[in-house]
Amino acid sequence: MVLAGAGLSAASGVPTFREAQSGLWARFRPEDLATPEAFRRDPQTVWRWYQWRRELVAGVEPNAAHTALARWQSRADLTIVTQNVDGLQQRAGGRVIEFHGNIFRDLCMAENRLLAPDEQVPGVPPRCRRCGAHVRPGVVWFGEAIDERDLREATHAAQRCAVFISVGTSSLVFPAAALAGSAVQHGATLIEINPHETPLSPTADYRFEAPAEQVLPALVARVASVQT
Ligand code: OAD
């Protein structure tokens, strides 16, 4: 099982969350924008921030780390759980549990249902054509619950995996950060791939202190050579 975080997409040019934000958004902290309270208080600012991130992500490509995972999954029983909302792993191929949602989805704030473009009245943010509530991005905000099915599937995978790889995540945001502990409790070997230490590092059986886009292609090639 692989649990991925923002570091997996860093080589594609998507800034990680706890990196300084650039340009216009430098004075905001994601923790102050990615909450239901922030959206209720200032829907325009939060919507514009997500539009900016959508445009950024739409303009980049999956990198060698995403491709390596997709290749691995095509020939092994590999569950990929990503905290990333950028959809890059899916574009590289493969099945992914999107633990924190997807930035390209639109939801009705009141009804919590997916909205197609023709179900929205344009605006900043748009409004739901049926009930008039604001449209919000289909991501999990701080303080919100993970989709029940995603949580169940990810927990089940953690409990039955032989190897748990935590890649490109600061291991600070729960419940995602708890999956590794659950895997270890059930006997899994823990591998961390991250150029920097995280709270998970001391418990890892193996640590690769290097970027995901270097480690994963090499690791996947090595596994393939051992298997054949
Ligand atoms: P963070 O920004 O917290 O952490 C990114 C991690 O990636 C850091 O530990 C970096 O050291 C590491 N990193 C940077 N470049 C890397 C590379 N090329 N290869 C490997 N690792 C690299 O991002 P997440 O842990 O994903 O939640 O953050 C978790 C959640 O917090 C996000 O999903 C988001 C955020 O706020 C929500 O939106 C709910």
Image (cartoon, rainbow, N blue to C red):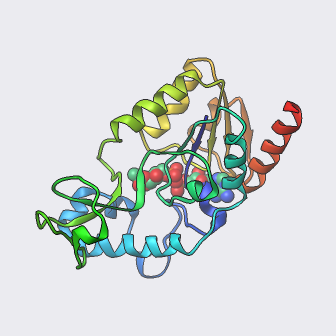
Q: How many marks?
A: 0
Residue depicted at x 33% and y 76%? 48
Q: Percent x, y for residue 7?
A: 60, 55
Q: Residue 134: give x, y in percent of width and height.
A: 19, 67
Q: Position of residue 117 (x, y in %)?
A: 30, 70
* Location of residue 51 with respect to 187 vertically, above or below: below
Judging depth in this view, the residue of 145 and 150 nearest the camera is: 150
Q: Residue furthest front?
A: 118
| Residue drawn at the location 23% of the way across and 67% of the way down | 119
Residue at (41%, 30%) from the top-left corner?
A: 152
Q: Look at the picture and state if 149 lies above or below 48.
A: above
Furthest toward the bottom, the residue is 24
| 121 sits left or right of 207 in the view | left
Residue 200 against residue 52 in the figure, above or below: above
Quarter holding the C terminus?
top right
Residue visible at 72% across and 47% down?
71
Asked if 227 appears above or below 87 in the picture, the reply is above
Q: Nearer the viewer, residue 46 or 151?
A: 151
State the residue lying farthest toward the top: 186
> Is 191 on the left or on the right of 51, as rendered?
right
Depth order, front residue of 4/32: 4
Quadrant where the image shows the N terminus: top right
